[in-house]
């Protein structure tokens, strides 16, 4: 069983909040829900919509045809009405025009219960769940949990909508267990807190801003600090300063902000002050299409900063991975004194996914500090690759500099010392690779002889497409740097047809695979119109590529 529900309206009409509430009600009832959010880059106005896919089995993406259009205005019907499925219908106010419409006199009901106009959304929610023959009480229970104000009015509105219509269909029964329903941004924030975050520093930029807001709302109860400086240059330099003092530091940004941070990324490379960076991609270049999604920054992230130095880039494919990969990023950054970059995008960051459970993380990040003697060598590396460090206040001189330096932190231009310190920093890579190999740097889904390769947020649509594709398996590459070339090369060599799927114009992962393994992937499905893949698009494009 799958149902597609589009909720649309003008900015300010509450389409996103309404979709989120509906999704939470369904997950509370034990269904799996995917929630896709679409909105323009406007301060006021414009058409916003969400698409919910509801199923009794796991789902990870949305489609472009709908069983129900939940219309908050006429524009929603105009834009999406032609995409109704054969037995689909529009749910909305009686004043809206269109075919296949279930009309409800919202004004009369609102006047009857003394409710404001926005409570009309709650009336339609009540009607929606009655259409599906689902019980009223779970709907009310979720509404009580989600809203702190006007709860009595909201309950009345939902009840009125529920009682005014008849059941249209009966959904297949779900699993009884309530599920997690969260976005990648929420999961990254939770992973940072679980890692022992001390300070998160960021300047607002779509689509990374939600992490800033989420962490700001949780800083007091979890005893960490959130700071918003004047720009992204200040952000990363302040974070390095906090890290120098011993803090577990993290920054977040998107394309243009990341561009401003690249000089300080090199400062991290030579100073070896641990740092975690969240890069949430959006469509570029420049301002581009800022509220939509892209995978165009992959090689930018891998190669950011001048000079050569070890670093990590990990690209989670869903919120569950976002949580665990964030913990891994903190662990690697602080153990090896490197920068760990978490590479996401608008799609995985702002879409809601459903999961049955979250296991206890196996990795516990630490500051990896040491108590120094007066002659402590702050830039030594131990036999297991760890770079223990001291911080100010530990009765020793602690230096961090942008200049090349010796193991005591004193600047040097001596050729032997320069080579020695470069060798010392790159010695870490061997140990970092060994750690990452234990963290499942790639995942393989299915057992077919043909291979689809992808990364990041394309995972969801590919997994949904795999349900209908025959003789395919999916290779998801999560760690981009250091690259797991031996595993990837083996998977490619053991495949018949190989297809690369990416949300960019040039196949950036394909370039990295060619560079790292010598394997050139000729067949590619690339989408670069700022919108994300649906499973139906992937199924159709795979058919074309294989002809």
Image (cartoon, grey):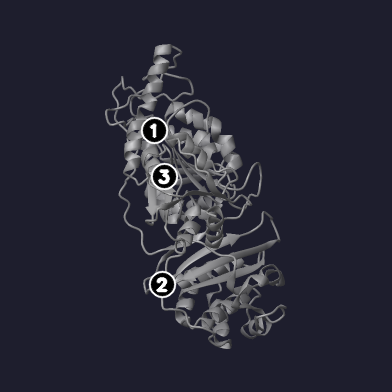
Occupied quadrant, residue 92: bottom right
Vertical position of residue 545 compared to residue 171: above or below: above
Task: Residue 173: give x, y in percent of width and height.
Answer: 41, 78
Marks 2 and 1, Cα distance to the nearest angstrom? 43 Å
Mark 2 vs 1, N-terminal side: 2
Point out the frontmost of discs 3 and 2. Answer: 3
Occupied quadrant, residue 94: bottom right
Q: Residue furthest left?
A: 383
Q: Is residue 37 left or right of residue 338?
A: right
Look at the numbered disc 3 and give the secondary structure of its residue: helix
Marks 3 and 2, Cα distance to the nearest angstrom? 38 Å
Front in this rendered view, residue 211 or 310: 310
Mark 1, residue position: 337
Q: Are marks 2 and 1 in contact (CB under 8 Å)?
A: no
Look at the numbered disc 1 and give the secondary structure of its residue: loop
Task: Residue 300: give x, y in percent of width and height.
Answer: 54, 37
Look at the numbered disc 2 and give the secondary structure of its residue: loop
Point out the frontmost of discs 3 and 1. Answer: 3
Mark 3, residue position: 492
Residue found 33% across the figure and 24% down from its top: 380
Front in this rendered view, residue 106 or 311: 311
Q: Is residue 295 left or right of residue 72?
A: left
Q: Quadrant of the C terminus?
A: bottom right
Front in this rendered view, residue 474 or 18: 474
Residue found 38% across the figure and 64% down from its top: 356
Point out the frontmost of discs 2 and 1. Answer: 2
Marks 3 and 1, Cα distance to the nearest angstrom? 33 Å
Task: Residue 270: give x, y in percent of width and height.
Answer: 45, 26
């Amino acid at each position: 069983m799958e149902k597609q529900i589009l909720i649309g309206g003008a900015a300010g009409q509450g389409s996103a909040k309404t979709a989120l509430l509906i999704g939470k009600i369904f997950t509370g009832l034990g269904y799996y829900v995917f929630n896709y959010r679409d909105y323009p880059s406007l301060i006021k106005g414009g058409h916003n919509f969400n698409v919910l896919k509801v199923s009794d089995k796991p789902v990870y993406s949305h489609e472009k045809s709908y069983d129900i259009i939940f219309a908050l205005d006429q524009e929603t019907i105009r834009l999406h009405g032609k995409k109704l499925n054969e037995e689909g219908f529009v749910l909305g106010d009686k004043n809206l025009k269109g075919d296949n419409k279930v009309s409800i006199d919202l004004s009369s009901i609102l006047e009857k219960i003394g409710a404001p106009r926005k409570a009309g959304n709650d009336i339609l929610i009540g009607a929606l769940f009655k259409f599906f023959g689902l019980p009223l009480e779970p709907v009310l229970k979720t509404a009580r949990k989600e809203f702190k104000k006007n709860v009595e009015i909201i309950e009345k509105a939902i009840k009125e909508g529920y009682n005014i219509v008849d059941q249209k269909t009966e959904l297949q029964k779900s699993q009884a267990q309530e599920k997690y329903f969260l976005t990648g941004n929420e999961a990254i924030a939770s992973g940072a807190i679980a890692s022992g975050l001390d300070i998160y520093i960021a300047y607002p930029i779509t689509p990374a801003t939600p992490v800033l807001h989420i962490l700001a709302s949780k800083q007091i109860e979890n005893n960490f600090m959130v700071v918003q400086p004047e720009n992204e240059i200040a952000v990363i330099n302040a974070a390095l300063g906090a890290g120098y003092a011993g803090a577990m530091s993290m920054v977040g940004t998107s394309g243009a902000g990341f561009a401003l941070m690249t000089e300080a990324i090199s400062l991290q490379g030579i100073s070896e002050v641990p740092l975690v960076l969240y890069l949430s991609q959006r469509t570029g270049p420049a301002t581009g299409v800022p509220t939509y999604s892209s995978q165009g920054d992959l090689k930018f992230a891998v190669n950011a900063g001048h000079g050569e130095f070890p670093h990590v880039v990990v690209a989670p494919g869903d919120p569950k991975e976002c949580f665990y990969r964030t913990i891994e990023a903190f662990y690697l950054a602080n153990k090896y004194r490197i920068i760990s970059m978490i590479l996401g995008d608008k799609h995985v960051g702002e879409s809601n996914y459903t999961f049955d459970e979250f296991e206890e993380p196996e990795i516990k990040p630490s500051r990896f500090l040491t108590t120094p003697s007066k002659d402590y060598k702050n830039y030594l590396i131990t036999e297991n690759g760890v770079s223990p460090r001291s911080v100010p206040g530990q009765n020793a001189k602690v230096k961090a500099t942008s200049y090349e330096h010796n193991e005591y932190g004193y600047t040097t231009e001596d050729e032997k010392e320069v080579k020695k310190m470069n060798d010392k920093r790159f010695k870490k890579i061997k140990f970092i690779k060994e750690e990452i190999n234990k963290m499942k740097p790639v995942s393989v889904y299915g057992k077919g002889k043909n291979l689809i390769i992808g990364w990041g947020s394309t995972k969801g649509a590919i997994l949904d497409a795999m349900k209908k594709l025959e003789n395919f398996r999916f290779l998801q590459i999560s760690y981009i740097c250091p690259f797991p070339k031996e595993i990837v090369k083996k998977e490619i060599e053991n495949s018949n047809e190989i297809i690369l799927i990416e949300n960019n114009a040039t196949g950036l992962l394909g370039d990295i695979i060619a560079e790292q393994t010598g394997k050139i992937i000729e067949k590619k499905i690339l989408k670069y119109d700022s919108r994300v893949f649906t499973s139906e698009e992937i199924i159709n494009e795979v058919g074309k590529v294989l002809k």
